Image: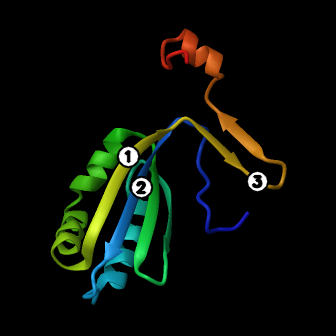
Amino acid sequence: MSDRFTTTPKPPYYAVIFSSQLSKDDAGYTDMADRMYALALEQPGCLGAESARDGEAFGITVSYWKDEESISAWKANARHLVAQTLGIERWYSHFELRIARVERSYSGPEGRSVQQTSSPETEIAEGNIEKM
């Protein structure tokens, strides 16, 4: 497996999905993004992150977290708050942030490994998912 992929534990865990379009004035962005990536990985509860940006300055970063408390602590981190402010004021023409709970994960193609917390039937029986 490539080191570009984050190794995550068995679900459940959380994914923070940050999609962004850089503005034309992106001076200093790459340095700050690199520092925030390294800082995020040092935070309690951070499981890793994956990021990509295309030739038209559209990017997606997905960070993985143990729980919602870890995500909230990262959002409130003082150095991260500075980066958020600069992003809003200077670097992003638009962004979307989504937080999702990961219930199942798969990898492959070498043997297609499946990690699942429980069967759909168990989830329905426990009232976690409505029957269709």
Q: How is the image coloured?
A: rainbow
Q: Is residue 3 above or below residue 127?
A: below
The structure residue drawn at horizontal position 66% and vertical position 22%, both measured from the top left corner, is: 119
Circles 2 and 1: CB atoms closer than 8 Å? yes
- Residue 82, x across and y down, in percent: 18, 69
Residues at circles 3 and 2 in contact by the CB criterion of under 8 Å: no
Q: Residue at x 42, y 48 (%)?
A: 45
Image position of 18 with respect to 114: above or below? below
At label 3, the amino acid type is Gly
Q: Mark 1 — residue?
A: 99
- Judging by the rendered image, the residue that carries numbered circle 2 is 17
**Nearer the N terminus, badge 2 or badge 1?**
2
Q: Earlier in the sequence, mark 3 or mark 1?
A: 1
Q: Residue 96 appears at what percent x and percent y?
A: 32, 58
Q: Relative to 5, does residue 71 appear above or below in the rendering? A: above
Image quarter (top left, top right, bottom left or bottom right) of the N terminus: bottom right
Q: Which quadrant does the C terminus fall into?
A: top right
Name of the residue lying farthest toward the front: 132
* Residue receiving disc 3: 108
Residue at 61% from the left image edge and 38% from the top image edge: 10
Q: CA distance from mark 3 to mark 2?
A: 22 Å
Q: Left or right? Give the position of 107 relative to 103.
A: right
Q: Secondary structure at mark 2?
A: strand
In this view, the residue farthest toward the right is 111
Amino acid marked by disc 1? Ile
Amino acid at circle 2? Ile
Q: CA distance from mark 2 to mark 1?
A: 6 Å
Label 3 environment density (alpha carbons within 10 Å; few <14, some 14–19, many ≥20): few
Q: Which mark is residue 25?
A: none
Q: Judge by depth and name the residue closer to the eye, 57 or 2.
A: 57
Q: Quadrant of residue 116?
A: top right
